[in-house]
Image (cartoon, helix red, strand yellow):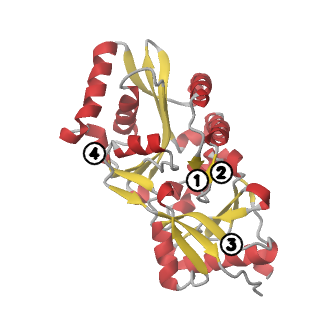
């Protein structure tokens, strides 16, 4: 009990991201949660906290009515079962709650199953939460017949804005104009937002609340100068005005770019296709995979992600402890 009594979960801060990212690279993981950036983006919506141990990182978030959820530990694969059981004892004995984990990555679940650590758990595949994976070169080139519609949108954009647009890598000095654009994008988006989606627990939710939480998370990132050495951010300017931007991080161990944020003026045809391509070409020119996260059960978002022809999916799972026991 001594070890779990000394465990302390603290609020995730933007300045923590670069340091904590080292834990995420300790084991195979192709999910968007293989980077702390996405956890920070939703820290206000999910009240994300972390517990840093000698050789592992444990994460939690808080839901409605006092519920608390965990993540599969970020540690060496050989230590995964140990830290999973440590987290289990903390939830059962300190929080007096069952250990329920959402967005459990496929690689971690497979390892825990083989170790026997999930014998007392329901393991449920959450299809609405699966991440879309793409071939990096395919998204950078958009070559081939299947991408003809994407190229048509880009060609239309280029014919209208020839000589008037440019891609720029962005820095801390650009934060105010990015936030101004984001405010306008948010205002327009909230006027037309779909009323339901599927959250990390598999329950329906109001995306407006999540969008507001994401807005606060993006602003927190943009206002933290330390994070710019870790995340990549780029934008499309038309006539000198920012009209689209994207934020992502690189997973070196998976040769994968994780695209966490992509916002564009929806009234400009081809702009989303342009920022999608140019961001990868400029910031992630050699990654093999691109993770563009899940579709949270929103049909329009699903159609958009499928239209880029994913080369695979990163399945995610919900883990529910059946009979919480107090462990000595």
Front residue of 220/261: it is 261
Indicate the secondary structure of the residue bearing disc 2: helix
- Residue ID at (62%, 67%): 101
On screen, residue 296 versus residue 276, left or right, reads right
On screen, residue 265 versus residue 207, left or right, reads left
Give the CA distance from mark 2 to mark 3: 25 Å
Give the CA distance from mark 2 to mark 1: 9 Å
Disc 4 or 1, which lies upstream in sequence? 1
- Residue ID at (56%, 63%): 23
Visible residue check, residue 144: no
Q: Considering the image in quadrants, where does the C terminus appear?
A: bottom right
Q: For label 1, count other residues whose C-alpha is less than 10 Å away and answer few (under 14), some (14-19) or many (20+).
A: many
Give the CA distance from mark 4 to mark 3: 40 Å
Q: Which residue in the protein does label 3 denote?
A: 99
Disc 3 or 1, which lies upstream in sequence? 1
Task: Give how far across and how far down residue 80 sits, in percent.
Answer: 56, 76
Disc number lying in front (2 or 1): 1
Q: Which residue in the protein does label 1 denote?
A: 36
The answer to whether 229 is drawn above or below residue 155 in the figure is below
Disc number lying in front (4 or 3): 3
Give the CA distance from mark 3 to mark 1: 21 Å
| Pointers 2 and 3 in contact (C-beta within 8 Å) | no
Indicate the secondary structure of the residue bearing disc 3: loop
Q: For label 3, count other residues whose C-alpha is less than 10 Å away and answer few (under 14), some (14-19) or many (20+).
A: many
Task: Give how far across and how far down residue 104 sits, in percent.
Answer: 54, 65
Task: Give how far across and how far down residue 308 sits, in percent.
Answer: 33, 43
Indicate the secondary structure of the residue bearing disc 1: helix
| Pointers 2 and 1 in contact (C-beta within 8 Å) | yes
Q: Which residue in the protein does label 2 denote?
A: 16
Q: Which residue in the protein does label 4 denote?
A: 137
- Residue ID at (46%, 14%): 240
């Amino acid at each position: 009990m001594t070890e779990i009594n000394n465990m302390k979960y603290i609020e995730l801060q933007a300045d923590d991201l670069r340091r904590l990212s080292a834990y995420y690279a300790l084991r195979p993981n192709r999910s968007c949660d293989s980077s702390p950036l996405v956890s920070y983006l939703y820290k206000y919506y999910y009240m994300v906290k972390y517990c840093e141990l000698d050789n592992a990182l444990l994460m939690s978030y808080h839901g409605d009515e006092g519920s608390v959820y965990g993540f599969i530990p970020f540690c060496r694969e050989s230590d995964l079962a140990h830290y999973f059981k440590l987290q289990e004892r903390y939830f059962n004995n300190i929080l007096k709650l069952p250990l329920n984990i959402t967005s459990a990555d496929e690689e971690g679940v497979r390892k825990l199953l083989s170790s026997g650590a999930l014998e007392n758990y329901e393991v449920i595949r959450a299809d609405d939460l699966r991440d879309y994976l793409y071939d990096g070169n395919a998204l950078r080139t958009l070559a081939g017949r299947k991408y003809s519609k994407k190229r048509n949108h880009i060609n239309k954009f280029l014919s209208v804005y020839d000589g008037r647009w440019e891609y720029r890598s962005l820095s801390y000095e650009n934060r105010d104009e990015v936030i101004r654009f984001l405010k306008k994008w948010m205002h327009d988006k909230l006027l037309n937002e779909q009323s339901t989606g599927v959250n990390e627990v598999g329950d329906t939710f109001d995306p407006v609340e999540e969008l507001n939480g994401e807005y606060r998370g993006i602003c927190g990132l943009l206002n933290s100068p330390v994070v710019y050495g870790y995340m990549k951010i780029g934008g499309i300017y038309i006539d000198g005005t920012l009209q689209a931007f994207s934020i992502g991080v690189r997973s070196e161990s998976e040769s994968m770019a994780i695209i966490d944020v992509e916002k564009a003026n929806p009234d400009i045809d081809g702009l989303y296709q342009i920022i999608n391509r140019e961001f990868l070409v400029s910031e992630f020119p050699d990654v093999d995979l691109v993770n563009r996260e899940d579709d949270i059960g929103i049909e329009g978002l699903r159609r958009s992600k499928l239209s880029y022809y994913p080369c695979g999916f990163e399945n995610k799972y919900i883990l529910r402890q059946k009979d919480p026991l107090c462990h000595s």
